[in-house]
Amino acid sequence: MEERDNSYTSTDFPNKIKVSLRDLDRDFESSGRFVGILHDGIMIESRKPFCLGDRVEVWIMIDQETPFLNCFGQILWIKKMSSYLFKVGIKIQCFPAASIGSPA
């Protein structure tokens, strides 16, 4: 499978923005960091592998004073960076009506 790692348009987000992810298909949670904005979604780094096509819920912590931003998406691509680190491309599919607040 061809990697699409070079398709992101912004890099070096300040302070390594934290993310929490919940895999809706395989029922597990993971944490990671926000890496960049893709033309059709976002790129994150995670310590747990996901499967292509899995549906995920994502919580993004903008900074220490800004609430979480919540969205849903689907795993588009995965790149193994090391034995314990993966870059993951997520296509954003929707933002809930009340998408800002603390994670449940």
Image (cartoon, rainbow, N blue to C red):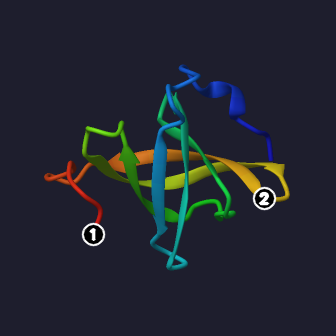
**69, 6: nearer the viewer:** 69
Q: Is residue 17 left or right of residue 96?
A: right
Given the image, on which type of amino acid does mark 2 rest? Tyr
Q: Secondary structure at mark 1?
A: loop
Above or below, 55 against 73 in this view is below
Above or below, 7 against 61 in this view is above
Please name the residue shown 74% across and 53% down the image: 85
Q: Which residue is mark 1?
A: 104
Q: Secondary structure at mark 2?
A: loop
**63, 22: nearer the viewer:** 63
Q: Which residue is mark 2?
A: 84
Q: Is residue 88 left or right of residue 54?
A: right
Please name the residue shown 70% across and 35% down the image: 4
Please name the residue shown 65% across and 65% down the image: 51
- Give the numbered dot on residue 59: none
Reading the chain from its start, which is encountered first: label 1 or label 2? 2
Q: Is residue 63 left or right of residue 27?
A: left
